[in-house]
Image (cartoon, rainbow, N blue to C red):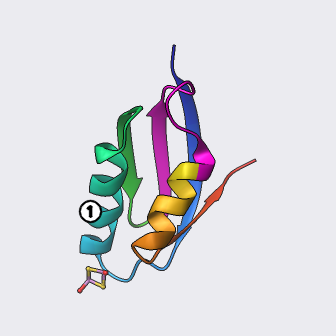
Amino acid sequence: VHDKAEFDISGMTCAACANRVEKKLNKMQGISEASVNFALETASVEYNPHNVSPREMIDAIDKIGYTLQEKT
Ligand code: 9UX
């Protein structure tokens, strides 16, 4: 059973930033698929809520220099 989280991202300057964010999310335990849209500054993440939370995603991405905000 997977949940889906949608985020706005700030701090991305070039397309390689988007790849960094996407790679980081895809390496996290519990995330089955993360995709970042550089132009729209958004991320869409499918995850298992037993293993990871949006809060942990926000914190992990903050550590590499970008800011996620979960869409409501
Ligand atoms: Mo582009 Mo982003 O040169 O950290 S990778 S600005």
Q: Count residues near mark 1 (Cα–Cα under 10 Å), then give few for <14, some for 14-19, many for 20+.
A: some
What residue type is disc 1 on?
Answer: Asn
The vertical placement of 45 against 71, above or below, is above
Q: Position of residue 39 (x, y in %)?
A: 41, 67
Q: Which element is circle 1 on?
A: helix
Q: Ligand 1: which quarter? A: bottom left
User: Going by the image, does 23 lie left or right of 35?
Assistant: left
- Residue at 55% x, 50% y is 56
The magenta stretch spans residue 51: yes
- Residue at 50% x, 70% y is 62
Beta carbon at label 1 within 8 Å of ligand 1: yes
- Residue at 47% x, 52% y is 43
The vertical placement of 19 against 3, above or below, is below
Q: Nearer the viewer, residue 64 or 37?
A: 64
Q: Position of residue 42 (x, y in %)?
A: 50, 57
The vertical placement of 46 against 14, above or below, is above
Q: Residue furthest top?
A: 1
Residue range of the region highlighted in magenta in the rendering: 40-55
- Residue at 31% x, 44% y is 26
The magenta stretch spans residue 57: no
Q: Residue furthest right?
A: 72
